Amino acid sequence: MMMAALNVYFVLYVATTSGLINSTQSHRDLFTILGASKSARFLRLDLPAALPAVVSGMKYAVPASFIGAILGEWFGSSRGLGLLMVSAMQNFQIPLLWSAVLMVAGASLIAFGLMTLVERLVYGRFQ
């Protein structure tokens, strides 16, 4: 669980920090001139400008979370698909191993595809 969280955290951190600089200096100056507080500027300017980058980071964090969960299950879990893969590999149960791998790959691709749809919606609205 912690491996998946670390993978997701770093992908989202990089995407969010790079997205927060997407608002232009002239827009920030306009908010300052109009007397907006820092929290209002963040909520109404910086966050909407960063949303496409954050959603794009979420799209790439989905497969990273699957990889982190599988690796975490390999090294320290008493159940799960990662342990099933290791057990099948050690017992030479190749069809079971490949079915588990294909199940994880399919779930990861489906989640990636759903996040791609969400990304297109966000880009259409906030870009």
Image (tube, helix red, strand yellow):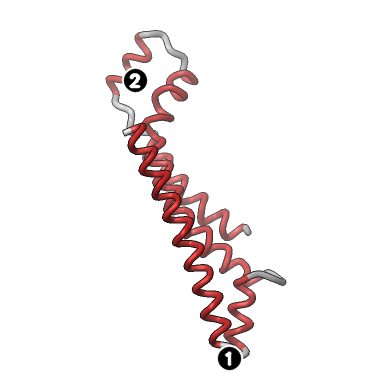
Q: Is residue 20 above or below residue 93?
A: above
Instruction: Identify the secondary structure beneath mark 1.
Output: loop
Q: Considering depth in this image, is 94 or 44 the residue closer to the camera? A: 94
Q: Is residue 84 left or right of residue 12?
A: right
Residue position marked by numbered label 1 in the rendering: 92
Q: Residue furthest right?
A: 78
Instruction: Identify the secondary structure beneath mark 2.
Output: helix
Q: Is residue 77 left or right of residue 48?
A: right
Per the model, the C-alpha gap separating discs 2 and 1 is 61 Å
Residue position marked by numbered label 2 in the rendering: 28
The image quadrant that residue 68 belongs to is: bottom right
- Identity of the amino acid at label 2? Arg
Q: Percent position (x, y) of residue 10?
A: 48, 51
Q: Nearer the viewer, mark 2 or mark 1?
A: 1
Tell me which residue sits at (32%, 14%) in the image: 30
Q: In what quadrant of the picture does the C terminus appear?
A: top left
Whichever of callouts 2 and 1 sits on the residue coming sooner in the sequence is 2
- Identity of the amino acid at label 1? Phe
